[in-house]
Image (cartoon, rainbow, N blue to C red):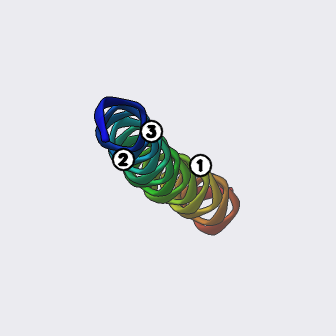
């Protein structure tokens, strides 16, 4: 009884951890994409000014 409850607790924490990690990864990826799009915009602007 106690062991199964312990296992459920651990799996729940693992799932929460994985979900949290995935969330931070997606946030990081969107930030990287935004940075890259800003960089390409700057390149286009510099080309347009020449």
Secondary element at tag 1: helix
Residue 45, percent from left and from top: 54, 61
Q: Do tag 1 and tag 3 residues touch (Cβ < 8 Å)?
A: no
Q: Is residue 46 above or below residue 6?
A: below
Q: Nearer the viewer, mark 1 or mark 3?
A: 3
**15 with respect to 41 (left or right):** left
Q: Dot 3: few (<14), some (14–19), or many (≥20) neighbours within 10 Å?
A: few
Provide the residue designation for mark 2.
8
**46 with respect to 16 (left or right):** right
Residue in view at x 63 percent, y 66 percent: 44
Residue 22, percent from left and from top: 49, 52
Residue in view at x 30 percent, y 31 percent: 2
Label 1, label 3: how far apart the Cα atoms are: 48 Å
Q: Which mark is residue 11?
A: none
Q: Dot 1: few (<14), some (14–19), or many (≥20) neighbours within 10 Å?
A: few
Label 1, label 2: how far apart the Cα atoms are: 46 Å
Q: Do tag 2 and tag 3 residues touch (Cβ < 8 Å)?
A: yes
Residue in view at x 49 percent, y 46 percent: 18
Query: Is 50 or 30 nearer to us in this picture?
Result: 30
**36 with respect to 26 (left or right):** right
Q: Which quadrant would residue 24 be assigned to in this image?
A: top left
Q: Which mark is residue 7?
A: 3
Secondary element at tag 2: helix
Query: Is 29 or 33 nearer to us in this picture?
Result: 29
Provide the residue designation for mark 1.
39
Q: Seen from this angle, which residue lies furthest front? A: 1
Q: Quadrant of the C terminus?
A: bottom right
Q: Dot 2: few (<14), some (14–19), or many (≥20) neighbours within 10 Å?
A: few
Residue in view at x 31 percent, y 41 percent: 1
Q: Is residue 41 above or below residue 15?
A: below
Q: Is residue 25 above or below residue 41?
A: above
């Amino acid at each position: 009884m106690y062991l199964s409850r312990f296992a459920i607790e651990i799996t729940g924490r693992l799932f929460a951890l994985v979900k949290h990690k995935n969330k931070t990864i997606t946030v990081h990826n969107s930030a990287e994409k935004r940075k890259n799009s800003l960089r390409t915009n700057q390149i286009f602007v510099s080309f347009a000014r020449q």
